[in-house]
Image: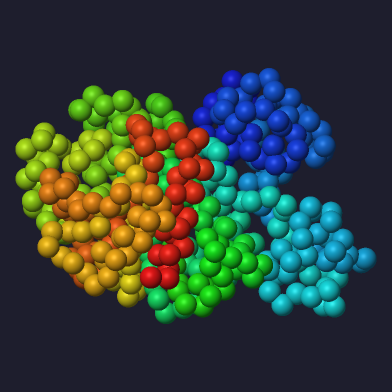
Amino acid sequence: MELLRLGSSGPDVELLQTALRRAGYYRGALDGLFGPQTWQAVVNFQVANGLIVDGIVGFATWSALNPYLTGYITWQIRPGDTLFRLALQNRTTVQAIMTANPGITAANLRIGNTITIPLGFEVVPTDISFTFRLLSLCVEGLTARYPFIQTKIIGHSVAGRALYSLDIGSGNNHVMYNASHHANEWITTPVLMHFLEEYAASYSNSGSIFGYKARQIYERSTIHLVPMVNPDGVDLVTGAIPPGSALYRMTQDMNYLNLPFPDGWKANIKGVDLNLNYPAGWEIAREIKFAQGFTAPGPRDYVGPEPLSEPESRAMVMLSRTYDFRLTLSYHTQGEVIFWRYLDYLPPDSLEIVRLFSEVSGYTYLETPYASGHAGYKDWFIQEFNRPGYTIEAGLGANPLPITQFDKIYNNNIGILTLGALV
């Protein structure tokens, strides 16, 4: 983690403020500004935890705060410990502890054994910038709380960041949801991650999600989530790649379109638009985009030197060829519309499914305009497998959409995310 002090700013400060709030030391805004109120909260936390009291957040302070970001601690059983007492001490529930430690019971607590104890708050924040670092913390926290979530790394980005696939379910009906192909559409990542957490909690508690029993969905389907296809680009837009760094300067030099920087950045860190890099009419997309002036690596709409030139798009193709996906959902932002078709392909049930998605979300469904209907992941999936694939454009406004839109976007889409595993 970055060393933070009075005057620091950015997404790491948002993370710090989130951890301090969860720990009970901060009540201010999650504004990413390390001001006097944040400094005082850090000092109070350091005093309470026996740390050097300097108001600076370095390795030791970050380590002490880490459980308030991942949402769990590890605990070595001591004489007199009971599940009830441990739950009370950590403001959690006996059920949560049992879920995180399969096979544990009140009768088999053994002194000296180490267990995982979830803390009494949701892991996935939905009110701050979502960076790759935050995604990694959430992946760690959710898989610790819910060991039935399977984590895979399906590849790495240009800059070496992991491309995660999070799988939940035991059924043979495999579906895949992905988000953040485009860097400045990063709000779609917490949509998928919050859904995963809500679904996992419902499953572990024998509850329901969007009116459907979570255990029935789990037994019928396996949902594969790729929550951040473009982590390098996301980190550029959210500020996790700091101004003045080599990557920042490199991308700034590629901004030949003079778009707002970095807010206007959609591409991966090499300046390739990942959702124009798939082998489905790629040559047509190249002709269209070159005619529009997108002829070189830049913030948007450059198709790349060839199809699948980028490690991120290659990883998505390899994942899709590994599983027999019944359906895919690709989350983007802008327009509250669902694009459901590629050229003349009409996969079985695809029209009926998109009508259902439209009904539960309130989003319009449209055929993709020809000028923008090539070389995307959805286009390739439909062409390759003749199965339903959908691009969902969530929210309204200018990208990147403000995180204040999260609740509305999520409420509009929870029905799609649930029914995607059932249709």
* Side of 396 where 351 appears, left or right: left
Residue at 76% across / 56% down in the picture?
Answer: 92
Residue at 50% across / 68% down in the picture?
Answer: 168
Q: Position of residue 388 (x, y in %)?
A: 27, 66
Quadrant in the rendering for residue 154: bottom left
- The C terminus is located in which quarter? bottom left
Q: Position of residue 146 (x, y in %)?
A: 61, 65
Q: Position of residue 189 (x, y in %)?
A: 44, 49
Tell me if I can see residue 67 in this picture: yes
Quadrant in the rendering for residue 402: top left
- The N terminus is located in which quarter? top right
Tell me if I can see residue 189 in this picture: no
Quadrant in the rendering for residue 384: bottom left
Residue at 37% across / 45% down in the picture?
Answer: 394
* Side of 121 where 10 appears, left or right: left
Count of all numbered marks drawn on residues in the image: 0
Nearest the viewer among 221 and 26 is 221
Nearest the viewer among 251 and 347 is 347
Judging from the image, the colouring scheme is rainbow
Judge whether 159 appears above or below 50 on screen. Answer: below
Residue at 63% across / 46% down in the picture?
Answer: 69
Q: Position of residue 362 (x, y in %)?
A: 38, 49
